[in-house]
Image (spheres, rainbow, N blue to C red):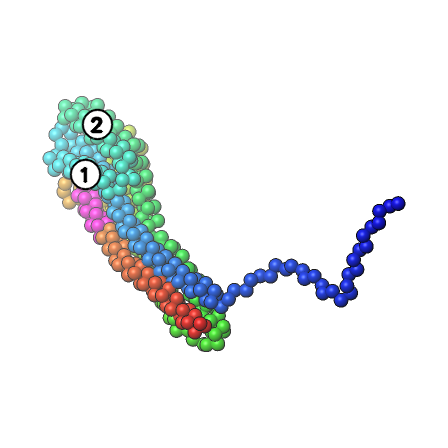
Amino acid sequence: MPPATAPTPAVAANAPPVPQTTSAKPVRSTPQQLRRLSTALVATGLVVGLLGALVFALLSYSLSRAQDDTEQLIRVQRIQTNLLSADATATNAFLVGGLEPPAQRATYDAAISESAALIAEAAQAQPADTAALSALNQQLTAYAATIEQARANNRQGLPVGAQYLRTASAELRSDALPILDLLVSTNAQRADDGMDLRLGYLFVTVALLGLVATVFAHIWLSRRFRRRINVGVLAAAALLLASLVTGLLATQQTGASVSETKAGSFAAVKTAAQARIGGNDAKSNESLTLIARGSGSAFEQAWATRADQVRANLDKLPDARDLGESWSAYTTIHAQIRKLDDGGSYDAAVAAATGSGEESANSAFNAFDAELADYLQSVSTATAGSLSSRTPGLVVAAILTLLTGLGAAFAGRAGVEARRQEYR
């Protein structure tokens, strides 16, 4: 017989349904929401304050570095000018033959000595340029040694002296000047980068977001507690607004001033220096053309190229009419020298190129070079003064944004805490 099966118990018709488990999202209590809001307002104020202090301190430092890089740029360009001036003096004195004029020898020695001193000063001022400046110093030493060999042979009337001179000038342009060109472009880029103030707009954006968040916090509190004004949170919003306005004004005013400097005196520094460098190079090629005696067409072509560059640079300079006239006076005499030389009057051409009278090329060029040096000094001073004048304002902005940010954090916390006390 099969085993009996147990009867299945009947389910009561009126039994209550079995409750099903649901994952209900916990509801945050009002005190919890207030604590979170207080923390968010404190964090907003601290972020705005600390970021403002950091950003404007960095911008102040960046402008200070831009000023240093501008000074380094000017220093390097002075080295470049001195070397070409020394070469122009050496080649011009070489035309005289025998013992060179003492005044020109002194001018050459001063240019070489100043170049060496400026190289050492530049290496100390900008460690990033040390390797390039070390290589430049080696080229300067080699150039000076070759010039001494040229002088020694020239005093003895040996034609090989002219070859030493041409070799020294060629190596100066092929080896030393490219190093200086690289240093000029590098420091110009550093200075230009240091004048970039876009970081200030990052702070303005963050401050604006913080202000918007604080305003929404005030709206939530007003609706939640049925009160229009929360003094603490409203004060926090006002302080953030003040921080925003301070940052925006500091960024815009400093940016406008720096942009004016970049387009004005800083651009004039670079242009005037290039004009002076080109002028000294042209003067050197003038003498090299005569030294070559009939085979100096390449040097004369180099003179013409440099002369065009000088004229183009002078045309870019504001208030440079007098400089243009001085350069024209020199180029007119140069044209006369070329006319004498090409016409067979070599000795007369040399006399016009090496003399010291008012109608000589040396006198006209020295007048131009002196005027351009004064102009370069004035725009250099203007650039440094403009950059340094903006630093105090950025320091003040850093302090103000820090204080207003901290004040906003304190005021926001106090405003939320007042509502927590009422809730209790």
What x and y, as percent, mark residue 114? 18, 39
Would you identify the image quadrant in which residue 180 lies?
top left
Residue located farthest toward the right when viewing the structure as drawn: 1
Residue 304: assigned label = none
Which residue appears at 47% of the width and 74% of the height?
Answer: 225
Q: Please tell me whether residue 221 is drawn above or below residue 70 in the rendered image.
A: below
Residue 275 in the image, given as x and y percentages of width and height:
28, 45
Residue 289 visible in image: no
Q: Let me know if residue 368 is in the magenta part.
A: yes
For image coordinates 33% across by 57% down, the residue present is: 53
Q: Which residue is mark 1?
A: 117
Q: Is residue 44 left or right of residue 130?
A: right
In the depicted view, which residue is nearer to us: 252 or 270? Answer: 252
C-alpha separation, residue under disc 2 versus residue under disc 1: 20 Å
User: Nearest the camera: 84 or 288?
Assistant: 84
| Residue 146 numbered mark, or none | 2
Residue 148 higher or lower than 3, as above or below: above
Q: Is residue 222 magenta?
A: no
Query: Which one is in front in this view, the residue at disc 2 or the one at disc 1?
Result: 1
Task: For the N terminus, give its image quadrant.
Answer: top right
**Count of marks overlaid on the render:** 2
Q: Answer left or right for 220 relative to 308.
A: right
Q: Residues within 10 Å of mark 1 (few under 14, many from 20)?
A: few
Whole-percent x, y for residue 394 in the image: 30, 58
Query: Can the viewer see residue 1 in this picture?
Result: yes
User: Depth check: 79 or 258 in front?
Assistant: 258
* Label 2 residue SS: helix
**Residue at (18, 31) in percent of width and height:** 94
Q: Start and end of the magenta stretch?
A: 361-378
Hey, which residue is sitting farthest bottom in the picture?
227
The amino acid pointed to by label 2 is Thr
